[in-house]
Image (cartoon, helix red, strand yellow):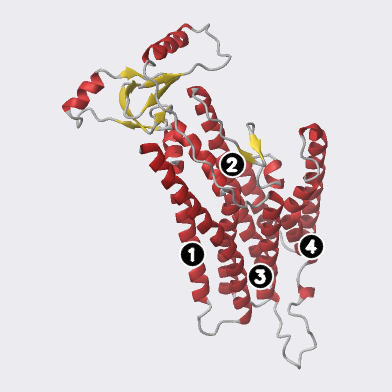
């Protein structure tokens, strides 16, 4: 079963492409049924400015708790003259400025762009982007220079770590440094890609490429953000050379902050509505399963002998057998336009054919982390500052756990009803 739709504005000068189009049209006597999507239920989604505010508050709180772990005082003892919980005078002021700038840069940039969202103000947005971005980089460079002057050259290696990681992941792009979510070339509404239902095979594959690049971009942001948050609570430990503190407790705080930042960032970058957009595109993409000629049944061999050559302009129905690059492939899905043997199409289909697995895995992971954090509070001889550390991260991680469980329940019931409507 093959249905063919020509690309809009395509040229017929190429003889081979014209032949493939004509063959696909001849094969399209029996049309396939295109998938129908169930409307996604309306539920509260976290806006960009609110997600940046939550991440900023989480990282600032984690850094403050780490300073308490290192520079704490016995402020409750009457013989001490201090009434401060932390020896603030022992903390390098430029370290505080460095952490403050890195934590607040995205939230401040988001608030600056909040008033200028229209495309008519594109030049103004570019001016804000490079002006504010240059100011942030200059401030960070000044703080790093003053820290280097007051400490050893080894600190230069410590401070260059996030810069090296950023260059490896993003290169010399400025936008990922200033925003967690930014748009790639394509159709976006409120920083979310939009799926367009079409019967054009080439347009469907182009949309898949756009969505795939958008997913990879968000995943890079996820990795970089959780690593940077862990770094911001680790760098105070590297500078506390003349202070005695519990290294094991400080290291545990870095680990749980990294895991907490991973869950929070995953919730903000991959909400259920976003995965539903990729799921809808997956239903149009379909998948190919390679057939083994030696293990095929006689009836399958007859079908394989009459298999048609795969065409990039055709839309194939379920269980259609095609030939491509000397191999046989059977389509899997209501419709299939994927390129046979394309590994990226196969991974995209497996990952987003049922996004419920993603949220169930993340929710289980977050639940285990919460249980471990709560169980660690029952350890003997636990210090009060570590109780504060674990309690802070566990409390903020419950937000991510709630959203993950909610997205899991929504997608589970939604795609269960979708499967019932498609195959019944």
Quick check: 150 left or right of 6?
Answer: right
Question: Is the C-beta separation of discs 1 and 2 under 8 Å?
Answer: no
Q: Residues within 10 Å of mark 2 (few under 14, many from 20)?
A: some
- The residue tagged 3 is 66
The circle on residue 94 is 4
| Mark closer to the chain start, 1 or 2 | 2
Distance of label 2 from label 4 (alpha carbons):
32 Å
Report the mark closest to the observer, 1 or 2.
Answer: 1
Residue 123 seen: yes
The label on residue 367 is 1
Instruction: Point out residue 126 in the picture as x, y percentages from the top left corner.
Output: 79, 37
Residue at x 56% of width, y 69% of height: 252
Can you identify the residue that label 2 sits on?
A: 217
Q: Residue at x 76, y 89 (%)?
A: 80
- What residue appears at the point 78 percent right and 50 percent down from the top-left corner? 111
The C terminus: image quadrant: top left
């Amino acid at each position: 079963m093959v249905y063919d739709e020509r690309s809009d504005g395509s040229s017929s000068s190429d003889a081979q492409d014209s032949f493939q189009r004509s063959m696909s049209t001849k094969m399209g006597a029996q049309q396939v049924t295109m998938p129908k999507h169930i409307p996604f239920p309306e539920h509260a989604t976290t806006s960009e400015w609110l997600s940046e505010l939550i991440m900023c508050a989480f990282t600032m709180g984690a850094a403050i708790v780490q300073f308490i772990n290192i520079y704490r005082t016995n402020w409750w003892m009457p013989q001490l003259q201090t009434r401060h919980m932390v020896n603030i005078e022992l903390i390098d002021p430029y370290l505080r400025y460095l952490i403050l700038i890195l934590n607040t840069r995205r939230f401040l940039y988001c608030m600056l762009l909040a008033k200028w969202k229209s495309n008519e103000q594109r030049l103004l947005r570019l001016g804000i982007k490079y002006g504010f971005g240059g100011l942030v980089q200059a401030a960070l460079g000044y703080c790093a220079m003053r820290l280097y002057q007051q400490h050893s050259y080894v600190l230069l290696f410590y401070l260059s770590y996030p810069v090296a990681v950023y260059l490896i992941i993003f290169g010399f792009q400025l936008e990922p440094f200033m925003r967690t979510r930014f748009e790639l070339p394509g159709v976006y509404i409120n920083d979310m890609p939009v799926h367009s239902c079409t019967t054009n095979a080439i347009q469907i594959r182009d949309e898949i490429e756009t969505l795939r690049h958008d997913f990879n971009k968000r995943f890079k942001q996820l990795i970089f953000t959780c690593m940077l948050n862990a770094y911001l609570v680790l760098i105070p430990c590297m500078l506390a050379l003349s202070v005695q503190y519990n290294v094991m407790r400080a290291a545990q705080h870095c680990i749980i902050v990294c895991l907490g930042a991973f869950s929070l960032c995953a919730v903000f970058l991959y909400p259920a509505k976003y995965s539903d957009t990729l799921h809808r595109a997956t239903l149009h993409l379909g998948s190919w399963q390679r057939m083994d000629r030696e293990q095929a049944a006689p009836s399958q061999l007859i079908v394989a002998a009459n298999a048609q050559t795969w065409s990039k302009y055709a839309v194939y129905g379920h269980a259609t057998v095609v030939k491509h690059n000397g191999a046989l492939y059977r389509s899997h899905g209501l419709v299939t336009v994927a390129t046979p043997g394309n590994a990226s199409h196969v991974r995209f289909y497996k990952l987003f054919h049922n996004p419920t697995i993603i949220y169930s895995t993340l929710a289980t992971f977050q639940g285990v982390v919460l249980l471990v954090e709560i169980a660690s509070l029952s350890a003997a001889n636990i210090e009060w500052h570590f109780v504060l550390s674990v309690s802070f991260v566990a409390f903020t991680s419950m937000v991510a756990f709630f959203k993950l469980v909610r997205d899991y329940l929504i997608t589970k019931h939604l795609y269960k009803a979708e499967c019932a409507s498609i195959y019944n």
